[in-house]
Image: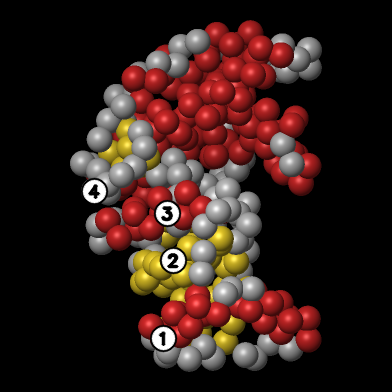
């Protein structure tokens, strides 16, 4: 391992945190580890590292199978092998369960840069093209054992309805949000397309010649337009106006067929859920969720004007 000082300690700690059985299983399949780099873990409580091996650079993420995020890892383990080659996503090289830990080993994408989907950024058009591709390549759904997108959305609905029931005096656009929420018919979300449902800059990697989509732990099955609708507030959050965001996606066939009332309802629930987390969620993420909620409200105001 080539790191020094505190960086070396972080590498050792990230790798050593894994049980011996997990580390042994990885080295048995991929050879001796010559370098370890700790990687961001996001909101999960697991361990993420980049490994340099005789069989190439690998990205490893693992967590205890009783962790709250473990079902997301299991879902990703079902989805990743089923993705067709045309979908740009790092290949799952191995998935295992040892010593009470779930481990996923992917190809590591390098060179890579941070994704920017803001106005004037080249990645904005690229992510729209990616969503168009997903709607075509993932119909019918190629994976088994996945929930419907309505199942995913019910969790958001539960928090949205709790916030609406509380009727906070400082909730901007309460009447608009409540009216739009009432328009959401869960049956209207149904379809037979595999959806990622969480496309944003943190789940995208800009490789040498294309964007890669990662973290399929919230994948679900539903209508193709839902993926587009879930992208739009992300574009607004990145700096696009609501009008600009909708103009970017207007050429996607699935979006043209999206039922307006269902889109409004989904936008309201998306925004209300993030407002709920901004008020009652973990302190470190409240500010970012408040910004996301504002982006969702701005989109809904534009649509319902």
Q: Which numbered disc, 1 or 2, marks the residue closer to the eye? A: 2
Determine crowd level at label 3: few under 14, some 14-19, many 20+ residues with C-alpha closer than 10 A.
some
User: Could you tell me which secondary element the residue under label 1 belongs to?
Assistant: helix
As measured in the structure, the alpha-carbon distance from the residue carrying label 2 to the one carrying label 4 is 23 Å
User: Could you tell me which secondary element the residue under label 3 belongs to?
Assistant: helix
Image location (x, y in percent) of residue 88: 35, 59
Label 1 close to label 2 by CB (< 8 Å): no
Marks 1 and 2, the one that precedes in the sequence: 1
Marks 1 and 3, the one that precedes in the sequence: 1
Image location (x, y in percent) of residue 157: 53, 23
Label 4 close to label 1 by CB (< 8 Å): no
Q: Which residue is drawn at 45% across and 85% down?
A: 27
Marks 2 and 4, the one that precedes in the sequence: 2
Judging depth in this view, the residue of 213 and 54 nearest the camera is: 54
Q: Which residue is drawn at 34% across and 53% down?
A: 79
Determine crowd level at label 1: few under 14, some 14-19, many 20+ residues with C-alpha closer than 10 A.
few
User: Could you tell me which secondary element the residue under label 2 belongs to?
Assistant: strand
Residue that mark 1 sits on: 28
As measured in the structure, the alpha-carbon distance from the residue carrying label 2 to the one carrying label 3 is 10 Å
The residue lying furthest to the left in this view is 140
Q: Which numbered disc, 2 or 3, marks the residue closer to the eye? A: 2
Question: Which mark, by number, is residue 74?
Answer: 3
Image location (x, y in percent) of residue 84: 25, 57
Marks 3 and 4, the one that precedes in the sequence: 3
Determine crowd level at label 4: few under 14, some 14-19, many 20+ residues with C-alpha closer than 10 A.
some
Q: Which numbered disc, 3 or 4, marks the residue closer to the eye? A: 3
Residue that mark 2 sits on: 97
Label 2 close to label 3 by CB (< 8 Å): no
Q: In this view, does 277 lie above or below 74?
A: above
Residue that mark 4 sits on: 142
Label 3 close to label 4 by CB (< 8 Å): no
As measured in the structure, the alpha-carbon distance from the residue carrying label 4 to the one carrying label 1 is 30 Å
């Amino acid at each position: 391992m080539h790191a020094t000082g505190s960086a070396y300690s972080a590498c050792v700690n990230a790798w050593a945190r894994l049980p011996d059985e997990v580390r042994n299983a990885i080295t048995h399949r991929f050879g001796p580890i010559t370098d370890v780099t700790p990687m961001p873990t996001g909101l999960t409580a697991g361990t993420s590292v980049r490994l340099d091996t005789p069989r190439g650079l690998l990205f490893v993420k693992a967590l205890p199978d009783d962790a709250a995020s473990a079902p997301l890892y299991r879902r990703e383990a079902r989805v990743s092998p089923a993705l067709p080659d045309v979908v740009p996503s790092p290949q799952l090289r191995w998935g295992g369960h040892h010593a009470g830990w779930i481990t996923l080993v992917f190809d590591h994408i390098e060179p890579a840069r941070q994704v920017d989907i803001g106005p004037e950024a080249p990645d904005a058009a690229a992510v729209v093209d990616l969503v168009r591709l997903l709607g075509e390549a993932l119909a019918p759904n190629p994976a088994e054992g996945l929930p419907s997108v309505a199942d995913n959305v019910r969790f958001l609905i539960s928090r949205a309805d709790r916030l609406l029931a509380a009727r906070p005096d400082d909730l901007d656009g309460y009447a608009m949000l409540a009216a739009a929420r009432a328009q959401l018919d869960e049956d209207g979300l149904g379809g037979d397309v595999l959806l990622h449902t969480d496309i944003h800059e943190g789940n995208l990697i800009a490789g040498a010649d294309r964007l890669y989509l990662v973290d399929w732990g919230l994948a679900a099955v539903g209508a193709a337009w839902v993926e587009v609708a879930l992208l739009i507030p992300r574009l607004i959050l990145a700096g696009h106006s609501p009008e600009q965001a909708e103009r970017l996606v207007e050429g996607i066939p699935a979006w043209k067929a999206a039922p307006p009332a269902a889109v409004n309802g989904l936008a309201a629930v998306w925004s209300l859920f993030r407002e709920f987390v901004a008020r009652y969620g973990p302190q470190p993420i409240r500010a970012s969720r408040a910004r996301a909620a504002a982006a969702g409200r701005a989109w809904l105001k534009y649509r319902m004007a």
